[in-house]
Image (cartoon, rainbow, N blue to C red):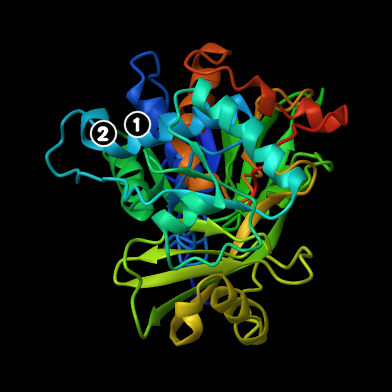
Amino acid sequence: MSAGQVFASPSGKRYDVIIVGGAVQGSAVAWFLLDNPDFNGSILVIERDPAYEFCSTSRSNSCIRQQFGCEINILVSRFGAEFVQNLRQFMGGDERVPHLPIRNFGYLYLAADENTANALRRAQALQQACGAGTRLLTPGDIRERYPFLAVDDIILGSLNTRDEGYFEGMAMFDWLRRSARERGAEYLANEVVAMTLNRAGTDVESVTLATGETIACGTVVNAAGPRAAKVAGMAGIGELPVEPRKRFSYVFSAETPLSRDLPLTIDPTGIHMRSDSAHYLAGCKPDRDDPVDPDDFDDQPELWEEKVWPVLAARIPGFEAIRLIRSWVGHYDYNRFDRNAILGPHGEITNFLFINGFSGHGLQQAPAMGRGLSEWIIHGEYRSLDLSAFAFDRIVHSIPFAEDAVI
């Protein structure tokens, strides 16, 4: 919450569903609940940063891909692409809702060693079986398609330009939130500071707000992004492995623009770069990828000069002459256990639900995850996609959900 922010008070004393966090995950859950004719309950969405200035949603690079190494992650993003491109239809044909095309420049993964190349081969076969348009490229294929790329050190590439690239993520979020409010969800500028369990310790009975009110609830959804572990701790859950990790983004111009769109290219160093309207965007993690305070958005200016620019210029010689336009710092809600989302109920506190730990995939996965969690709340099961692989129990039993394709 920014300094001087005035908290508001809720209109009611009890809600069927309280969602802690109103950014894209929380708003997706609220919207899909209210879109389902089998739900007729009340919803309170509590957001400590109602301007969404520092949330991971607003500081995202707004991309979507199907190039994952696990079937369920591929299917989740395929629904994300469907939802984005048919947003108006999903929202009942409301003519105010914009058409949100995906700018399909695609993702281009570059492998410089056989282990990485074999991982791309395995993933491509799975992606193709799931209906994605991924194809493998030899260095010669890459040179022919993207002659500005230096690929002497590359042995294989993987590219998909169908339903994969950039989209207006903030527009999707804005309409999920706006439509949820119009359908009856109450959004509250406030902060949850405590939770009270029943005597048996099996349910959250109420949440306490920074303004002192105690609000009774039927279900609590943890959609608090990088602050998810703190929220879980209020319910006595101490083993949620989600923490804020800094990610750095840079928009720059080139003295000589490239001859065609640059796909989101993942360099073997881990630095990624892509076209961004008339400019270009690059991103990276810090050299020491440690957890940070959720209010720490301090820049590290040396990263651009010492780490990012040299890699850009080596991979694309035309990027020797570029000018940095702006940069920003965002946070991943990073799942240090296995870098995949955590979704669904806690095993012992059964009305406490997670939608956390997206590790950079939150925007693109929000439609499928919000739909799935709403199904769980209403029906006690997932009906559209089987999302049980994301269950919290895997954390308890130390069974990681392996996914190689994490940027």
Q: Position of residue 229 (x, y in %)?
A: 73, 49
* Residue under the point 69% across and 61% down: 245
> Given contact means CB atoms under 8 Å apart, are the residues at marks 2 and 1 in contact?
yes
Helix, strand or loop at mark 2: loop
- Residue 217 vs residue 32, the one in the foreground: 32
Q: Quadrant of the N terminus?
A: bottom right
- Residue 17 visible? The answer is yes
Q: Position of residue 15 (x, y in %)?
A: 49, 32
Label 2 – label 1 distance at C-alpha: 6 Å
Pick out the residue farthest to the left: 95
Residue lying farthest to the front in this orientation? 140
Image spot of residue 402 (x, y percent): 75, 34
> Nearest the camera: 267 or 285?
267
Residue 159 location (% of width, % of height): 48, 44
Q: Looking at the picture, tell me which residue is in the foreground, 406 or 224.
A: 406
Which mark, residue 90?
Answer: none
Question: Mark 1 — residue?
Answer: 82
Quick check: 348 above or below 296? Answer: above
Check the image and report above or below for 33 versus 65. Answer: above
Give the residue at x 67% y 29%: 390
Horizontal side, residue 153 vs residue 374: left or right: right
Where on the picture, by quarter, is residue 278?
bottom left
- The tally of labels here is 2
- Whether 374 is drawn above or below 112: the answer is above
User: 10 Å neighbourhood of mark 2: few (<14), some, or many (≥20)?
Assistant: some
Q: Residue furthest right?
A: 397
Q: Which residue is mark 2?
A: 86
Amino acid type at image mark 2: Asn
Mark 1, secondary structure of its residue: helix
Residue 98 in the figure: left or right of residue 392? left
| Residue sitting at x 52%, y 20% | 129
- Relative to 281, residue 105 above or below: above
